[in-house]
């Protein structure tokens, strides 16, 4: 029996970032897979030791471009965990709102990419079209479409303007209808069903063995969600369900993400309603952090983000450990890719929504090869903000 | 306090020192007991290994595992301290917890720890980068 090897990567149209998979195939069937990462490693944990806590918030925000609020969310909770710092109620609602809006845009982004990977570009165009209003909401709240810079130790940086809450709820109502339409079309589509059902199954036992997290684990019937298990911010004050399915295939991962989007919209609406009536400050003044250890975690769109901070009483961490959800989800390919055909391997690799920048904790800044330099981008951004402001009047 | 008192009663004789916080239990165990503690936490209590942190302190090289008990939100963090800084060695928990494979490989290349019994003791992140210095997260790296 001949066994051949098919390399995927390090640069491949399927993968937004650089990593290397080796599929060992017997005919059309994948019998084994080797994973190689390390092309994006830049040593964030080492850089963080030379930054103050406030500077580190900006640093960890730039670990990942898609879930850029999950890392600061977990990091500030880790620092607050050292001294058990309480944060004001209004700040708790704002943190929850930002986190959930990010989940909506991230799940829509994945839905679009998943449609694109299986050659179904209609899904891609519709999903990304209705992701745009969510990014506009971020711009209304924080001034940025991504990298919001909203988190501070002891609270949040900016308040949500009460006069804009009504407009934000209006946008949410509008996108809810549209996402319902996309979800119904995607769930009932015979092409998607026949393409995704029973493909890349991750059993419950394998999900527990590999310590998988997030939608990857929940699609396999493991009911874990940090928002319920250890409710921080305002998650104990809002009403929502966690979505768990049993089959563990790619279709179930799609269903989990789609249904979670509606739960997120529900949470966002509750937070915005509460922000109308909740008064008070948005930030407690934290003067110093004592020596100790703290753990912070947050349910990012891809699963649990984990930050550990050890402090010595100064304004810098002695040790800062970051663990992104893809770090534990990517090894599950060893279980889910075995026995499937080569054509199904691509969508299975995409099904955990892998984020390699997070996994290896790195950033890349290149401005030499781009025509748009820093100030051009800044100018464009300001123009867009002005445009949105005009539309809102 | 929290619900980890039962754990302290059962595993109390293996714990050398401990720090108790709400929902968090940091404790130190000997290298020969780490497999037993990991087995109890993972297989009996049904904890999930979040990750592990390795760091260099004045006492030696330290490995801190983070086991999350998802039903209660408690973190159990067993700590193993290796005083031999030149050649730190400890038992690998990967044969018990398969999810520890990558993080032990990473700790091994970042701080030069040898995990005995690891099924694949190869570098994870710096394998392709030969020019990267060895053990980059060690303090006093100029010595």
Image: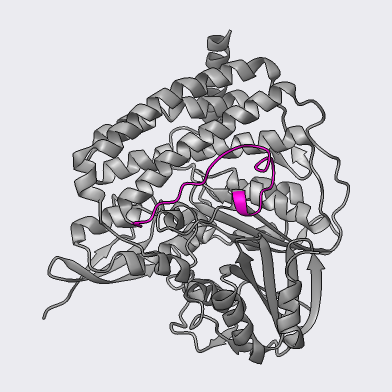
- Identified at 19% across, 47% down, the residue is A194
Quadrant of the drawing holding the N terminus of chain B: bottom right
- Identified at 39% across, 29% down, the residue is A179
**In the depicted view, which residue is nearer to us: A214 or B53?**
A214
Quadrant of the drawing holding the C terminus of chain B: bottom right
- Identified at 56% across, 71% down, the residue is B46
Magenta stretch: dominant secondary structure: loop
Q: Position of residue A255 (x, y in %)?
A: 37, 44
Tell me, yes or no, if residue A299 can be seen here: yes
The reply, left or right, for residue A119 in relation to residue A69 is left
**In the depicted view, which residue is nearer to us: A376 or B5?**
B5
**In the depicted view, which residue is nearer to us: B133 or A54?**
A54
The reply, left or right, for residue A230 in relation to residue A109 is right
Q: Is residue B127 above or below residue A21?
A: below
Is residue A287 rendered magenta in the image? no
Q: Position of residue A161 (x, y in %)?
A: 69, 20
Q: Position of residue B41 (x, y in %)?
A: 61, 76
Tell me, yes or no, if residue B134 can be seen here: no
Residue A95 picture quarter: top right
The reply, left or right, for residue A190 in relation to residue A77 is left
Q: Position of residue A177 (x, y in %)?
A: 41, 23
Residue lying furthest top: A393
Report the number of numbered marks: 0
Residue A113 picture quarter: top left
**In the depicted view, which residue is nearer to us: B51 or A57?**
B51
Magenta span of residues: A228-248
Residue A158 picture quarter: top right
């Amino acid at each position: 029996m001949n066994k051949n090897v098919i390399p995927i990567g390090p640069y491949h149209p399927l993968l937004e970032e650089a990593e290397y998979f080796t599929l060992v195939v017997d005919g059309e069937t994948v019998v084994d897979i080797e994973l190689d990462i390390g092309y994006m490693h830049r040593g964030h944990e080492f850089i963080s030791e030379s930054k103050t806590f406030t500077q580190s918030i900006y640093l960890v925000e730039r670990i990942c471009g898609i879930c850029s609020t999950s890392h600061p969310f977990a990091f500030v909770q880790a620092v607050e965990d050292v001294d058990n710092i309480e944060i004001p109620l209004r700040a708790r609602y704002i943190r929850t709102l930002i986190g959930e809006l990010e989940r909506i845009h991230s799940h829509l982004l994945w839905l679009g990419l998943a449609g694109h990977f299986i050659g179904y570009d209609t899904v891609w165009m519709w999903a990304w079209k209705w992701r745009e209003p969510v990014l506009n909401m971020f711009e209304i709240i924080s001034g940025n479409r991504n990298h919001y810079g909203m988190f501070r130790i002891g609270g949040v940086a900016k308040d949500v303007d009460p006069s804009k809450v009504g407009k934000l709820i209006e946008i949410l109502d509008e996108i809810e209808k549209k996402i319902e339409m996309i979800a119904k079309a995607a769930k009932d589509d015979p092409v998607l069903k026949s393409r995704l059902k029973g493909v890349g199954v991750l059993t419950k036992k394998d999900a527990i063995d590999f310590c998988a997290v997030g939608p990857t684990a929940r699609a396999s019937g493991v009911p874990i969600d940090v928002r319920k298990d250890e409710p921080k911010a305002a998650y104990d004050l809002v009403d929502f369900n966690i979505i768990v399915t049993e089959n563990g295939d790619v279709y179930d991962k799609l269903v989990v993400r789609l249904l979670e989007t509606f739960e997120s919209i529900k949470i966002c609406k509750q937070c915005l309603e509460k922000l109308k009536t909740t008064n008070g400050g948005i930030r407690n003044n934290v003067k110093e952090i004592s020596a100790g250890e703290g753990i912070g975690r947050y349910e990012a769109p891809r699963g649990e983000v984990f930050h550990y901070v050890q402090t010595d009483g100064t304004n810098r961490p002695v040790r800062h450990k970051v663990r992104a959800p893809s770090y534990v989800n990517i090894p599950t390919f060893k279980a889910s890719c075995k026995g499937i055909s080569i054509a199904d391997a691509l969508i299975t690799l995409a099904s955990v929504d892998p984020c390699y920048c997070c996994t290896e904790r790195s950033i890349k800044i290149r401005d030499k090869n781009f025509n748009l330099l820093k100030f051009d981008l800044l100018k464009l951004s300001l123009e867009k903000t002005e445009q949105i402001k005009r539309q809102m009047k | 306090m929290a619900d980890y008192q039962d754990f302290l009663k059962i595993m109390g004789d293996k714990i050398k020192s401990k720090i108790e916080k709400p929902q968090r239990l940091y404790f130190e165990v000997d290298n020969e007991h780490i497999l037993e503690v990991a087995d109890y936490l993972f297989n009996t209590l049904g904890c999930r290994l979040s990750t592990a942190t390795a760091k260099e302190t004045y006492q030696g090289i330290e490995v801190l595992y983070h086991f999350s008990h998802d039903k209660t939100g408690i973190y159990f963090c067993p700590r193993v301290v290796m005083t031999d800084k030149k050649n730190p060695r400890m038992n690998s928990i990967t044969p018990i917890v398969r999810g520890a494979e990558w993080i032990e490989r990473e700790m091994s290349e970042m701080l030069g720890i040898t995990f005995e019994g690891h099924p694949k003791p190869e570098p994870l992140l710096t394998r392709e980068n030969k020019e990267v210095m060895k053990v980059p997260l060690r303090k006093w790296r100029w010595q």
